Image: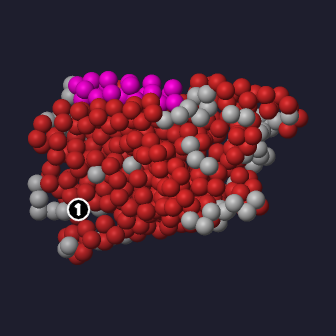
Amino acid sequence: MSSEALNMRGPIHGTKDAKRVAVGSSVGATIETYDFIGFGTAAALYFGHTFFPGTDPLTGTLAAFATLGVGFAARPLGGIIGGHLGDKIGRKPVLVTSLIVMGLATFMIGLLPTYEQVGVLAPALLVLVRIVQGLAFGAEWGGAILMTYEHAPWKHKGRFTGIVQSGFPVGLLLANLVFLVSVQLPGDWGWRVPFLASVLLVIVGLVIRSKVPESPVFDDVKKAGEIVKSPIKEVIRTDWRNILRGIGLRIAETAGYAVSITYMISYLHTTGLAANWETLTALSIASAIGIFATYSWGRLTDRVGRRSVYILACSFAALFGIPMFLMVNTGSFLMIIATIVIAYAVCQNSMAGAQGAWFPELFQAKTRSSGASLAYQISAMVSGFTPFITTLLFIQFGWMGPATLFICYAAIGLWAALITKETWGPRERQLANEAVAAHPQKSSV
């Protein structure tokens, strides 16, 4: 490899807007996570009896989780649309549009009638709005992470993309804090208020994102006349192996989260191991820690590489599957907090922190948005229906079913990490150091 091979990563020292872009992308990620993940919390605690009454609690939970999965199933299509547009017209337009669509869809959830009010129309509307959420969220990640990655300095890609990835635990924290407060409200207001309140966050996000400049890498591709006619077809033809590897890497993180966090909320609730406020408190603590953990994991990849962090994370997750349920089964509030913190800040955040820089580096600049988005979002179909599948496994096998599934997901991620190339190894770091030394006057870090 020569230093020229690193040029597709943007300016050596990043742009003068690198930090502003990272923060702006992170704010958007926060908002969209608040919207999208908040649905998972509401599905676990409220939607079973609100939109699917007349069934036993477990069946209602299954139906609510199926609706949750529909949004995840729509994410690959959103990723295809967003990735295609990101490679054709730029990263910024995708960022702004996805945020607007997500905000409107989430606000509409807060206005939806219940089953008691309009019958079967209520769950039908819920599914429809959830699909729109999925499309918007699918388009979001590629634009946000690539804008940040391509503005960031060569030597600090992990740190800057870690800022964006940290927006997800911020959104999770905000969503759970709002639910923690709203759970005290009477009737349907307990779940309506969090969705209605999201409109304030969207306004703030639009103001910030409107001022973010376009990616310098996309501008270079455009000036060179290298815009691909059909980025999706091109990346599938030339980089399908990396897409498959990325899917495997993501399954360990996102589907693992679906077991250890999304399903765990329902598990603690339905088994009576914890009250709603205890579960939300534990998740809020984990989210707060996760903000700093995700950033730190991303920064660590700049020092030791992306692949090594991922291998360590997946190995630990595979070993943690059974202890995770043994710990919460004690019913101890402190043990529940410890379990969720470990599952989130160590297992999930470490993988998310590494993905921010690793995924863009697996693809060429001219098809990077499409490739990274496909790899990132296709796995969402697995994670989206995981809480549903996990509930069925629990019915059949008890807690060992979900624990085993969690271990399997970690094993898939470990296998994918072992067969995926390191994109920031000793050689790349050496070349970057030499490039920085040759142009010290341009350093902005």
Q: Which of 127 and 119 is in front in this view?
A: 127
Direction from residue 190 to residue 164 in the image, left or right: right
Quarter of the rendering occupied by the C terminus: top right
Direction from residue 217 to residue 125 in the image, left or right: left
Q: Is the magenta stretch mostly helix, strand or loop?
A: helix
Q: Nearer the viewer, residue 30 or 67?
A: 67
Direction from residue 356 to residue 273 in the image, left or right: left
Confirm whether the magenta stretch covers residue 317: yes
What is the magenta range? Answer: 307-326
Confirm whether the magenta stretch covers residue 394: no
In the depicted structure, whether residue 77 falls above or below residue 421:
below
The residue drawn where x is 11% and y is 41% is 396
The residue drawn where x is 42% and y is 36% is 416
Q: Which of 383 and 84 is in front in this view?
A: 84
Q: Is residue 286 visible?
A: no
Identity of the amino acid at label 1?
Thr
The spot of residue 53 in percent (x, y) is 16, 62
How many labels were placed on the picture? 1
